[in-house]
Amino acid sequence: MAEIQSPRGTRDILPDEQPLWQMVRDTASYTAEQMGFRPITVPTYESLSLFRRSIGSGTDVMDKELFLVRGPHTEPGKEEYALRPEGTAGIVRAYIEHGMSSLPQPVKLYSIVNNFRYDRPQKGRYREHTQISIEYLGDSSAFADAWVIYCTYRYLTELGLNNLKLIINTLGTPAERNTYGEKIQEVLRPIIDSLTGDSQTRLEKNPLRILDSKDANDQEALASVPPLRSFLGEESSARYAEVLALLDQWEIPYEQNDRLVRGLDYYNHTAFEWLIQGNEGQQSSLGGGGRYDGLVGQLGGPATPAVGAGLGLERVMEAIQAQGGEEVEKITPDIFVVAADETSKKKAMEIINLVLNEGWSVDTALGKDGISSQMKSANRSGATIALIIGEQELSTQSVQMKILATGDQENITESDLVAKLSDILGQACDCDNCSK
RNA sequence: GUGGCUGUGGCGCAGUUGGUAGCGCUCCUGAUUGUGGCUCAGGUGGUCGUGGGUUCGAGUCCCAUCAGUCACCCCA
C-alpha cells in the first residue's frame, strides 16, 4: 500500500482504460454538437451563493455534500466558494453574465464537467465524477424537452448500450407542485410517526421528496396519497402528453413513473432519468434531467424557460464494460525503431524524424543497448513494423524492415522507405481516425 | 452520517492451534555480444493498511484508526 493514496472517493483512469474513456467522452461531445449544442467551459468552482440560490437548501447536495473552497485569508462569510456539485448552475450563470439572453433563442449549450460531492464512496459513486451537461435555454416548448431526451437517447444507443430504461414524470407548474406538497402534508401528518426519520423531516421542508423513498412503510403510507397527475391543470397535462407523443414519434421507449421527483429543487414539468437494467443495485442511474423554467430568473437573469440533462460518464463507461462490449483497440505505434550500436543511433534519429513528418506514430527504446532488448521492447509496444539499423545498413544506405506479427524481414534502401511503409501501413490500418 | 464484510510485493492470492513471510503473473539479467514472442536458469521487490495492547514471541488474538467494498441515505 502506497504511503500516499488518491483521496477518498477519487480514482485514476489508467492508460489501459483511456481508449474507452476517451471514446465515451468524444462520443458525448460529438452527439451534442451534432444536435446543435455548442461547447462551453465554466470554472470548476463558483460562489457558494450561486449553488445556494439554484440547487436550494433542503436538498442533500447542498446540506451535506458540498466541497467548500476558501482562500488562506478568507474571513468567514466572505468570498466563499464551492466546487461545483453539478453543471447546470455554472452554465446558467454564464448565460446570464454574458448576456446570452440577447442572442437568438434558443441557446443550446453543453459541457463536460467534473463535479464534486462529499458523499460516502461506493461502487459507481465517486466524490469527483464527470458528467456531460446539456442545456436548452430560451424555449418553453414540449419539443425542447423531447430534443434533450432524444439527444441523451442517441448518445447512449450510439455507444451500444442496451438494457436502457427511461423513466419520466411531470411535476407540473410550481403552483401545482406546491398544492400537491400541501396535499401530501395533509395526508401524512396524522400518521407522521409511521414514517422514517428522513421522511419526517422532509414532510415539512420538501414533502415531494418523500415520494421516492424506498422504505416499505413510507411507501405504504403514500398509498393513500393521490397521484400528482390528478393535481395538474389542463395545460400541464396537455404539455406532458405532447412530450410523450414526441418521444413516441422518435420511438424512444419510456416508462411513466408518478414517484420520480429528482433531488434538485429547480425542476418543474418534465423530469426524467435513465436507468441501466440488469445491475439492479442503487447505482443504476446513468443520469437524468428535466425542465427548470424558474432557474434563470432565480439567479437574477430575465425569465427564461429551459430544459437540460446530465449523464454520469464514469457510469456510462462502467455500463459498457459490464456489457463486455465495445472493443476499443489499444493505441500502438506504427513503427518501432531499433539501432544496433552508437553510430547507428544517429541514423535512427534521422529515420524517426522522417517517419514522424510523414505522419506515422513511432516508438523506440534507444536508451537501451543491444538489439535483443530493443527488439523485446518493440514486441511489447505492439508496433506493426520494426526498422532496424546497424553497421551493414549504414554502409549500404538501407534499413531492415521487419513485420513483427509474421517475422518477415527485408532490406529496404532509404530512398524506397517511405513508399514501402505506405504500402504496408496502408494495408495494416483501416481505421478512420488514425493519422494516415 | 448508519450498519455488514475485507486490507499480506506492481497485480492476483496462500499463510494451519500465535513460533524464521511464501506462490503465480509482471519486472530485471543471462542462455542468445545483428533480431522479439516460446522455453530454461537466476534475480529485484513486502517494517503483512496504520497506531496501540496482550504475549518470551503477533500476518495470526484484542482495541482504535485509515482505506476499500456492499447495503442504507442520496445521486451521476
Image (tube, coloured by chain):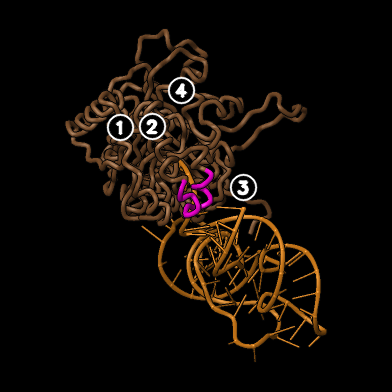
Q: Is residue A395 visible?
A: no
Q: Which residue is mark 4?
A: A295
Frontmost residue, B17 versus A30: B17
10 Å crowding of disc 3: few (<14), some (14-19), many (20+): few
Q: Is residue A191 magenta?
A: yes
**Residue at image location 44% in from the left, 12% down from the top:** A100
Inspect the image, locate mark 1, and give the three-letter code of the amino acid beneath it.
Ile
Image side of residue B34 versus residue A79, left or right:
left
Q: Which residue is mark 1?
A: A149
Inspect the image, locate mark 4, and give the three-letter code of the amino acid beneath it.
Leu
Disc on res. A7: 3
| x then y, percent, for residue B67 | 61, 55
The residues bearing labels 1 and 3 have C-alpha atoms spaced at a distance of 34 Å
| Residue stretch in magenta | A190-201
Mark with earlier residue (2, 4): 4
Mark with earlier residue (4, 3): 3
The residues bearing labels 4 and 3 have C-alpha atoms spaced at a distance of 33 Å
| x then y, percent, for residue A225 | 35, 44
C-beta proximity under 8 Å, tags 1 and 3: no
